[in-house]
Image (cartoon, rainbow, N blue to C red):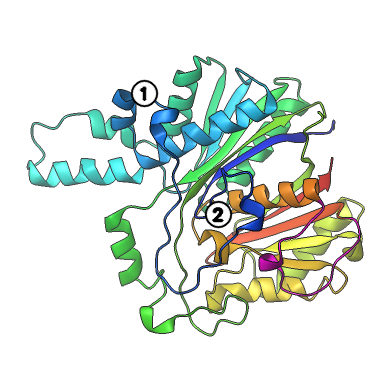
């Protein structure tokens, strides 16, 4: 299989990640239940008339995709692939509210049309007048990884040279209320959160959109080579280490050849045990975490991929991400491990371009 490179990376998140100096200004959050994305001034990117009809996730994705395309110097990609866990939940809620308030009569179709998960990829394509392969993956916490896998296959099969791949998820009031009721979101009495050694269940919920250009050719601006991806819907705790070791073995790597491991510690004691198991394999690697910077959400791995790209390019790890004090002179291989509530485990291997 031919090499696949990440040639640009853009992210809208809880951090000011559109700012060039974001790397030095990362702020940890451990004492609120919900953290909101720092949004740009949409008027600079989207006509106001169109912006009014767009939900937050469509607007975030439109801007992040524009940044990614501009950085890669591409006007129209050969394919657009988006991963999302919750899709356009704001419009879904509006539609359902309309159904209830109007006794299922005289409904306008607008909110329903805009509530489908593939609205994001469709709106980006409309904006670019791009009539190529357009696909959306909805696989909870591995939605982005499935999108990467598809893009990799498109490039390796010669179907595309450059693919716009993104991940996006937004918050909605009603969903956040339900998450508090079922204890998905951490109780207020459990703050502040110790992400690495948490003894309580629940997470701090975030949101964001991350977009990347994957290409078959390495460029001057290439961040990383996307080496491999492994996915598992279910994993018993005792299988965790074997899952990781088999993946490394498949890529002809030993544990100590992984220079940095980015783990998805979320502060949820019952599911973070998988990351504790994974940590034991890497005594000679820098161990990092990131959900204290992004919050937990279905496609939070987009934020970790974005951070990994910048770590590889800058050859520098932000102190705020470090779990241990181990650092290597050169960062060549980064392993990303993520899951959501103990389900949909993903491994992504990135190598310095």
Q: Position of residue 298 (x, y in %)?
A: 50, 54
Q: Earlier in the sequence, mark 2 or mark 1?
A: 1
Q: Residue at x 7, y 43 (%)?
A: 103
Q: Is residue 323 magenta?
A: yes
* Horizontal relation, residue 255 to residue 237: left or right: right
Q: What kind of element bears circle 1?
A: loop
Q: Is residue 201 above or below residue 64?
A: below
* Horizontal relation, residue 114 to residue 134: left or right: left
Quick one: quadrant of the C terminus? top right
Q: Position of residue 260 (x, y in %)?
A: 80, 61
Residue at numbered disc 1:
47
Q: Is residue 249 above or below residue 47?
A: below
Residue 326 position by quadrant: bottom right
Q: Position of residue 7 (x, y in %)?
A: 73, 33
Q: Is residue 57 above or below residue 199?
A: above
Q: Residue at x 48, y 80 (%)?
A: 192
The part of the chain drawn in magenta is: 315-330
Quick one: quadrant of the N terminus? top right
Q: Is residue 135 above or below residue 95?
A: above
Q: Which mark is residue 120?
A: none
Between the residue at mark 2 and the residue at mark 1, the CA separation in whole angstroms equals 28 Å
Residue at numbered disc 2:
300
Magenta span: helix, strand or loop, mainly?
Answer: loop
How many numbered badges does the structure rendering display? Answer: 2
Residue 18 position by quadrant: top right
Q: Position of residue 243 (x, y in %)?
A: 75, 63
Q: Residues within 10 Å of mark 1 (few under 14, many from 20)?
A: few
Q: Is residue 343 visible?
A: no
Residue 261 position by quadrant: bottom right
């Amino acid at each position: 299989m031919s090499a696949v490179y990440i040639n640009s990376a853009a992210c809208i998140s809880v951090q000011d990640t559109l700012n060039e100096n974001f790397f030095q200004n990362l702020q940890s959050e451990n004492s609120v239940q919900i953290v909101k994305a720092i949004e740009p001034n949409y008027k600079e990117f989207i006509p106001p008339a169109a912006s009014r009809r767009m939900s937050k996730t469509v607007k975030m994705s439109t801007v992040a995709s524009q940044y990614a395309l501009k950085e890669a110097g591409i006007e129209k990609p050969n394919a657009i692939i988006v991963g999302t866990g919750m899709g356009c939940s704001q419009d879904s809620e509006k539609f359902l509210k309309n159904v209830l308030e109007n006794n299922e009569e005289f409904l306008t179709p607008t909110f329903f049309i805009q509530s489908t998960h593939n609205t994001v990829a469709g709106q980006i394509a409309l904006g670019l007048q791009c009539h190529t392969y357009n696909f959306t993956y909805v696989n909870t916490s591995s939605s982005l990884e499935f999108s990467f896998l598809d893009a990799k296959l498109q490039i390796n099969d010669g179907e595309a040279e450059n693919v716009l791949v993104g991940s996006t998820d937004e918050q909605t009031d009603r969903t956040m209320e339900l998450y508090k009721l079922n204890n998905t979101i951490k109780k207020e009495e459990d703050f502040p959160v110790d992400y690495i050694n948490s003894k309580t269940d629940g997470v701090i919920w975030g949101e964001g959109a991350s977009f990347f250009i994957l290409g078959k050719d390495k460029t001057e601006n290439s961040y990383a080579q996307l080496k491999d991806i492994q996915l598992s819907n279910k994993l018993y705790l005792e299988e965790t280490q074997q899952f990781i070791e088999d993946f490394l073995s498949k890529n002809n790597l030993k544990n100590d050849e992984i220079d940095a491991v980015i783990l998805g510690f979320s502060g949820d004691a019952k599911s973070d045990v998988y990351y504790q198991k994974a940590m034991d394999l890497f005594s000679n690697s820098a161990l990092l975490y990131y959900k204290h910077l992004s919050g937990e959400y279905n496609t939070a791995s987009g934020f970790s991929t974005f951070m990994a790209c910048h770590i590889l390019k800058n050859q520098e790890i932000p102190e705020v991400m470090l779990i241990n004090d181990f650092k290597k002179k050169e960062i060549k291989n980064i392993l990303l491990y993520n899951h959501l509530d103990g389900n949909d485990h993903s491994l992504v291997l990135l190598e310095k371009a």
